[in-house]
Image: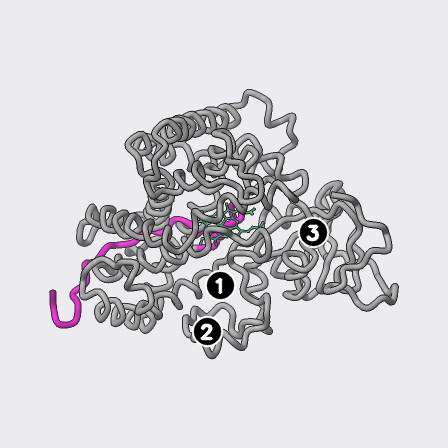
C-alpha cells in the first residue's frame, strides 16, 4: 500500500479541512520503560475499558511500537469501513503465519479481496441450509452422551461442539473424518499458544523449547491432515456440499482462476481458527446467562417448546426462533471479541487526532458494547435490546461483534445459524446449572475472544410443560 502524504485526511473521520490536528492524549498509568504493556497483558478488559474516559483516540505505549486505541463508534467504523483502505494487517500477523499461511486472515489489498470473493459462495444461503443439518446433528450427538445429573465442563463441551461443527461443515468426506479427529486433537493446542507467540520476539519462538516444539508439532500434524483431505477431494472432483468443495470448485469471476491446493488448505485453516473458539465461547456464555436469568430461560423454553415440541431444531425453524436469536445477539454484545488490530502504513487523521505512519491501531468491540451511551445498563443481560424497534434506534457502528466492512466476518451467518440451532436443540431437552460449590466464572481475554474460566455445570433433563 502506498503511504499517504502527511497532509492526508480521512474525510469521514476527520474534521473539515482545518489543520486542527492534535496529538492523542496518552493513556494514564504508563510504567517507566514498560509503558502500558503490563496493564494490557494482565487486565486487558479493565485497561481497555478505562480508555474511553481519556478520549476518542488514545495513545498507549506498548514497547517501541506507537499504538493508538480508538474508543468512538464513528471512528471505529471509519477504520473498518470508510477509511479501511488506509489500514492493513501489519507485522503482528506474521507471528501466526506459520499457522494461517497465506489465507484470507493474513492477506491485504487486492489479494485479500480475491480470497474473499472465492470464499463467498461457501457462505451462500443455500449452502448454510445444508450445513444446518450438520449443526443440529452434532448438537444432538453430543448431548446424547450427557447423563442426567452429571457434571460437565460446559466451557469445554461448547468448544468441542463448535470445533466439531466447523470441521464437519468443512470436510464431510470419509478422509475428512480422520481430519476432524486430528483437528480436535491439534487445534486446541495451537490456539492456546497463539497469545504467547504474538507477544514474544521471533528469536525466542525459534528456540527448541518444549512449548515451541509442541506448537510446531501440532501445526505440522494439523497441516498434514488437512492437506491430505484437500488432495483426496481434488482427486474426487465432485461437489459433496461441504465448504471444501466450494473452495476447490469456485473460479474467480474476473480471471477464471481457481485456488491452488495450498491456497485451499490455508483458507480451510483460517476458517478453523476463526470459527471455533468464537462460537464455542458464545455458546458457553449463553448457558451461563440462562442459568443466572430464570425469566430469560423460561421465555426461551416457552419458545423451544412451542416451536420444537422436544425435537431437534432444523433450518426452517429459524424464523420462528426469534427469542432464541435475541438471546444469541445479546451474548454476542455482552461477550464480543475484545480486540481487533490494524496497522496504518501512512499518516491518518481520526477525528482531530493525527495517527502517525507505522502505528498500530486497535479497538475493542467488547468495550464499545459496554459503553452506557450506546447500550444502557451494559452489564445487564437483556435479549429484548434486540427487539426490532429497539435495535433500530441503535447508532450505526454500536454493534460490531463480527466487525464491519471488507474484513467483516464471512462466517457471521454461519455462526448465528449454528448458535440458534444448537442453543434451541439443547434447551429443548436440557437445563444446565452451575455445579454446587463450583468456582466463580470470570471473563478471560485470550486470543481475540472473551472466554469463560472453568464452568462446571450439571445437566438436568427438562420436563416440558404438558410432558413428552
Ligand atoms: C460467534 C462467532 C464468531 C465471531 C464473534 C466472529 C468474529 C469475527 C470478527 C470480529 C472478525 C473480523 C476481524 C477483523 O476485522 O480483523 C472475523 C473474521 C473472520 N472470521 Fe469470524 N467470527 C465468528 C465465527 C466465524 C465462523 C463460524 C467462521 C468460519 C466458518 C469465521 C471465519 C472468519 C474468517 C475467515 C475471518 C477473516 C476474514 C478476513 O480477514 O477477511 N468466523 N470474525
Nearer-N-terminus badge (1/2) = 1
Q: Locate the N terminus by quadrant.
A: top right
User: At x 69% / y 51%, what residue is drawn?
Assistant: 85
**Element type at mark 3:** helix
Foreground of the two, 195 or 353? 353
Residue 466 on the magenta span: yes
Q: Residues within 10 Å of mark 2 (few under 14, many from 20)?
A: many
Query: Cβ(mark 2) to ligand 1 < 8 Å?
Result: no
439 horizontally vs 362: left or right: left
Nearer-N-terminus badge (3/2) = 3
Circle 3/circle 2 CB separation < 8 Å = no
Nearer-N-terminus badge (3/1) = 3
Q: Which residue is mark 1?
A: 333
User: At x 70% / y 45%, what residue is drawn?
Assistant: 62
Q: State whether residue 261 is above or below residue 42.
A: above
Residue situated furthest top in the rendering: 208
Q: Which residue is mark 3?
A: 85
Amino acid at each position: 500500500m502506498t503511504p499517504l502524504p502527511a497532509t492526508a485526511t480521512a474525510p469521514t473521520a476527520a474534521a473539515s479541512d482545518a489543520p486542527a490536528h492534535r496529538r492523542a492524549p496518552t493513556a494514564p498509568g504508563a510504567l517507566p520503560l514498560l509503558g502500558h504493556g503490563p496493564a494490557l497483558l494482565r487486565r486487558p478488559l479493565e485497561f481497555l475499558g478505562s480508555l474511553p474516559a481519556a478520549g476518542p483516540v488514545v495513545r498507549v505505549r506498548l514497547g517501541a511500537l506507537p499504538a493508538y486505541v480508538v474508543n468512538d463508534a464513528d471512528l471505529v467504523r471509519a477504520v473498518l469501513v470508510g477509511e479501511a483502505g488506509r489500514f492493513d494487517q501489519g507485522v503482528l500477523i506474521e507471528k501466526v503465519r506459520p499457522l494461517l499461511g497465506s489465507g484470507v486472515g493474513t492477506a491485504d489489498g487486492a489479494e485479500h479481496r480475491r480470497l474473499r470473493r472465492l470464499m463467498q459462495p461457501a457462505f451462500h444461503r443455500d449452502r448454510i441450509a445444508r450445513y444446518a443439518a450438520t449443526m443440529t446433528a452434532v448438537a444432538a450427538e453430543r448431548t446424547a452422551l450427557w447423563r442426567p445429573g452429571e457434571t460437565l465442563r460446559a466451557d469445554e463441551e461448547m468448544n468441542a461442539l463448535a470445533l466439531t461443527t466447523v470441521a464437519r461443515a468443512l470436510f464431510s468426506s470419509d478422509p475428512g473424518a480422520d481430519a476432524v479427529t486430528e483437528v480436535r486433537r491439534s487445534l486446541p493446542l495451537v490456539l492456546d499458544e497463539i497469545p504467547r507467540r504474538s507477544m514474544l520476539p521471533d528469536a525466542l519462538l525459534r528456540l527448541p523449547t518444549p512449548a515451541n516444539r509442541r506448537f510446531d508439532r501440532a501445526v505440522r500434524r494439523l497441516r498434514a491432515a488437512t492437506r491430505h483431505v484437500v488432495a483426496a477431494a481434488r482427486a474426487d472432483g465432485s461437489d459433496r456440499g461441504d465448504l471444501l468443495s466450494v473452495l476447490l470448485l469456485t473460479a474467480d469471476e474476473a480471471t477464471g482462476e481457481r485456488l491452488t491446493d495450498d491456497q485451499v488448505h490455508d483458507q480451510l485453516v483460517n476458517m478453523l481458527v476463526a470459527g471455533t473458539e468464537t462460537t464455542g465461547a458464545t455458546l458457553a456464555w449463553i448457558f451461563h446467562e440462562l442459568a443466572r436469568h430464570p425469566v430469560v430461560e423460561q421465555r426461551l423454553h416457552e419458545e423451544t417448546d412451542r416451536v420444537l415440541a422436544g425435537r431437534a431444531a432444523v433450518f426452517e425453524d429459524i424464523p420462528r426462533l426469534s427469542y432464541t436469536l435475541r438471546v444469541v445477539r445479546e451474548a454476542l454484545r455482552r461477550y464480543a471479541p475484545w480486540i481487533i488490530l490494524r496497522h496504518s502504513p501512512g499518516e491518518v487523521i481520526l477525528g482531530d487526532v493525527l495517527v502517525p505512519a507505522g502505528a498500530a491501531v486497535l479497538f475493542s468491540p467488547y468495550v464499545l458494547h459496554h459503553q452506557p451511551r450506546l447500550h444502557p445498563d451494559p452489564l445487564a443481560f437483556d435479549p429484548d435490546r434486540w427487539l426490532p424497534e429497539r435495535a433500530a434506534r441503535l447508532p450505526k457502528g454500536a454493534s460490531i461483534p463480527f466487525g464491519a466492512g471488507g474484513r467483516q466476518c464471512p462466517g457471521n451467518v454461519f455462526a448465528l445459524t449454528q448458535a440458534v440451532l444448537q442453543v434451541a436443540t439443547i434447551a429443548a431437552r436440557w437445563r444446565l446449572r452451575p455445579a454446587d460449590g463450583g468456582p466463580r466464572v470470570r471473563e478471560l481475554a485470550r486470543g481475540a475472544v472473551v472466554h469463560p474460566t472453568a464452568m462446571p455445570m450439571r445437566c438436568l433433563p427438562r420436563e416440558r410443560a404438558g410432558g413428552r
